[in-house]
Amino acid sequence: MRSFYFTFLLLMISFTLFSQASVSGRIVDSLQSPVPYAIVALLHSGDSAVVQGKITDGDGRYTFSDVQSGRYVLKVSATGYSDNYSAELNKDSMQDLTVPDLTPGKTLQLSAVTISTITPTVQFTNGNITVNVENSPIARGNSVYDLLSKLPGVGIENNSITIQGKAGVILMIDGRVQQVSDEQLMTVLKGMSAATIQKIEILKNPPLKYDAAGTSGMINIVT
């Protein structure tokens, strides 16, 4: 009898481990060119609750990992476009799902009588990049480490953060330089939920007092 229960338990564990798979795809524009750094949110079809949020890479690709079976809808948000939604996705948890290419909504045009106060998720200013995380779908289901590894120009390899392929990046949290080892820093970033972050600033042109130290850039995480 114990052998039966042990076998049953192993089967249940195996089913749980393999009952989750990925949902991936690509965001393109009307000319089939990739749309990088768009926001893709995975929503429950029934109540539109956000399950996960991702930023597309330079090729417009995204991947949601460990997605349970169910019915979902993808919401696409990109700077300069209105939001757009996919058709309903029926996710079979036993298999990875590749979604056909999606496009953002209509191109937004400035109206003479309309002023928009919506802050885009990704902003480019004077060579610097600001990612507004608060109230964005990308805050759901991601760590700060996950976000950094997807940000424009940022790379993480062998526990070292780079900007445009250059090492020597200074990382700050709320304006305070983190003077710890690379391994400790990675542990901190992996343990920080993106839901606790307001924005991430990527400063390719840091202030002179830091530039004098030979840094290739700075990243400031604002909680």
Image (cartoon, rainbow, N blue to C red):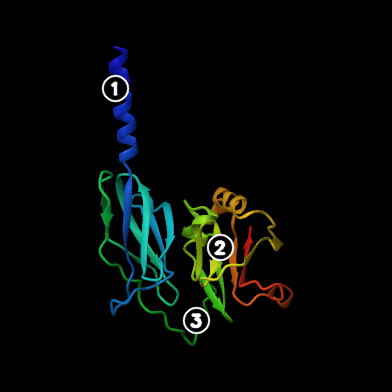
Q: Position of residue 102 (x, y in %)?
A: 30, 67
Q: Residue furthest bottom?
A: 112
Residue at image point 64% right, 54% down: 181
Pair 3/1: label in front: 1
Q: Amino acid at mark 1?
A: Thr
Callout 2–callout 1 Cβ contact below 8 Å: no
Cα distance in 3D space between marks 3 and 2:
41 Å
| Image: 39 above or below 97 | below
Residue at image point 67% right, 73% down: 214
Q: What's the mark number on residue 114?
A: 3
Q: Amino acid at mark 3?
A: Thr
Q: Position of residue 175 (x, y in %)?
A: 70, 63
In this rendering, position of residue 198 left or right of residue 103: right
In this rendering, position of residue 7 left or right of residue 150: left
Pair 3/2: label in front: 2
Q: Which residue, given by chain and number where applicable, does mark 2 sit on?
A: 161
Q: Position of residue 189 (x, y in %)?
A: 57, 53
Using the image as rendered, state which of residue 136 and residue 100 is in the foreground: 100
In this rendering, position of residue 80 left or right of residue 10: right
Q: Amino acid at mark 2?
A: Ile
Q: What's the mark number on residue 32?
A: none
Q: Position of residue 76 (x, y in %)?
A: 38, 65
Q: Which residue, given by chain and number where applicable, does mark 1 sit on?
A: 7
In the rendered structure, which disc, 3 or 1, sits on the residue that comes first in sequence? 1
In the rendered structure, which disc, 3 or 2, sits on the residue that comes first in sequence? 3
